[in-house]
Image (spheres, rainbow, N blue to C red):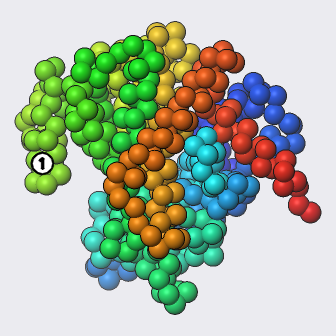
Amino acid sequence: MNPRNELDTPMFRLAVAQFDQAAELMGLDRNLRERLKLPDRSLIVSVPIRMDSGTVKVFTGYRVQHDSARGPSKGGIRYHPDVNLGEVAALAMWMTWKCALAGLPYGGAKGGVRVAPEQLSSAELQRLTRRYASEIFPMIGPDQDVPAPDVGTDAQVMAWIMDTYSQQVGYAVPGVVTGKPLSIGGSLGREEATGRGVVYVTLEAMRHLNLTIDQATVVVQGFGNVGSHTARIMHEAGAKVIAVSDKTGGLYRAGGLDIPMLLSRYQAEKQPLRDTKLGEWMTNEELLALPCTVLVPAALSEQITMDNAARIRCRILAEGANGPTTLDADPILTDQGVFIIPDILANSGGVIVSYFEWVQDAQRFFWKATDIQDRLHEIITTAFQRTIEFSTRRRTSMRMAALMNGIDHVAQAHLSRGLYP
Ligand code: NAD
């Protein structure tokens, strides 16, 4: 099998099409375009594990480093049955632009295993993680490539990766992953960071559009790490969160959902979303079409497409997920007056606080929660202001402005370093 063929998936095509559009608008050097379109390194690994039943099952894992001109590469690890090389490579490319846009000294990477984690026992999940970590061991390291959580992985998975890596080198290396538990060098505020960042940039967008949070209605698709923290922090900030969903469907209440009660039933008591009975039940498709001030897709990619874009009725689309909107849906949304906060800006709070965690690990010196929040606020609102200023000056969309900004930083790094040999 030719691995380059494996790259050719809808998500990789989306990432490349966005890149091509931005590169064209900025008149990017042709030679650089060729280099930046493909990942630097891609590793496909077999991950054999013994199941609790005694049989051996082999899963497929990936780690892709898209670019490392600006520093070690950084990016999450996804456990999901649809994971493939093209998806991981697309996510790695977006990480490159995201880190550059935020001014973090990182390149972009991503990893994943094609698995449905909820179908594994905790012991199987641990064996899978440890074997995957040892298979990608040659690629990762605190100065090389630093994984973090993404869909289907969490702080516990990061702890197992940190331990596996540390066992191999013979001493504790907290900086090899971010998003790990506090007990082994995690950072305060990392778990909620992506959601908090989504809220900070949404508040900036509201200020720009003369909207106020206490009048705002919010719809969140996906109620995992990003979605649940976004809903909670939006609620705490005074917005009315009228609908949330997970992969089973959505819960809607016109007067606003009781978010603290919902979190307690869904997360603490592990009730299915529908059984919480805190709102009316609807499909994800219906949820996306609800009239609202802010729509936050915080699940998977390609949720807003040419087919449903005309039905989207929000004022602000804050992309918590990576790649939730297809390229052909963008102009439809813009024509409807939707203000888009693109993924590489909207969800950059996660990697920004991951950066803080990595810095704290390197310094062996840990910060207060308020330091984390203040610094996150400063970096993400500066990135927002830079993007909106660029978008206004160049008369281009927020998505193109964010991409062009990110790509430009990476291009400058390549031009400074030159082409080896
Ligand atoms: P997660 O696994 O914690 O949550 C995903 C949620 O999406 C779950 O509630 C799941 O039920 C729901 N979901 C899955 N399929 C769905 C569907 N078809 N319709 C509606 N809901 C569906 O994952 P996460 O970490 O919250 O990541 C969500 C998105 O945010 C991903 O695109 C991820 O790449 C992106 N992201 C995550 C982080 C982070 O720090 N975790 C940072 C930046 C971006």
Residue 249 visible in this rendered orientation of the protein: no
Which quadrant of the view contains residue 256?
Answer: top left
Q: Nearer the viewer, residue 191 or 208?
A: 208
Q: Position of residue 304 (x, y in %)?
A: 45, 27
Q: Position of residue 2 (x, y in %)?
A: 72, 57
Q: Nearer the viewer, residue 359 or 343?
A: 359
| Residue visible at 84% across and 51% down in the picture | 416
Q: Position of residue 202 (x, y in %)?
A: 40, 29
Residue placed under numbered mark 1 in the picture? 264
Relative to residue 103, is residue 414 drawn left or right?
right
Q: Nearer the viewer, residue 196 or 49?
A: 196
| Residue visible at 55% across and 28% down in the picture | 385
Relative to residue 36, is residue 92 drawn left or right?
left
| Residue visible at 35% across and 15% down in the picture | 211
Amino acid type of the residue tagged 1 in the rendering: Ser
Note whether 321 is above or below 138 in the view shown: above
Query: Which part of the image, by quadrant, shows the N terminus?
Result: bottom right
Relative to residue 249, is residue 321 drawn left or right?
right
Note whether 224 is above or below 162 in the view shown: above
| Residue visible at 26% across and 32% down in the picture | 237
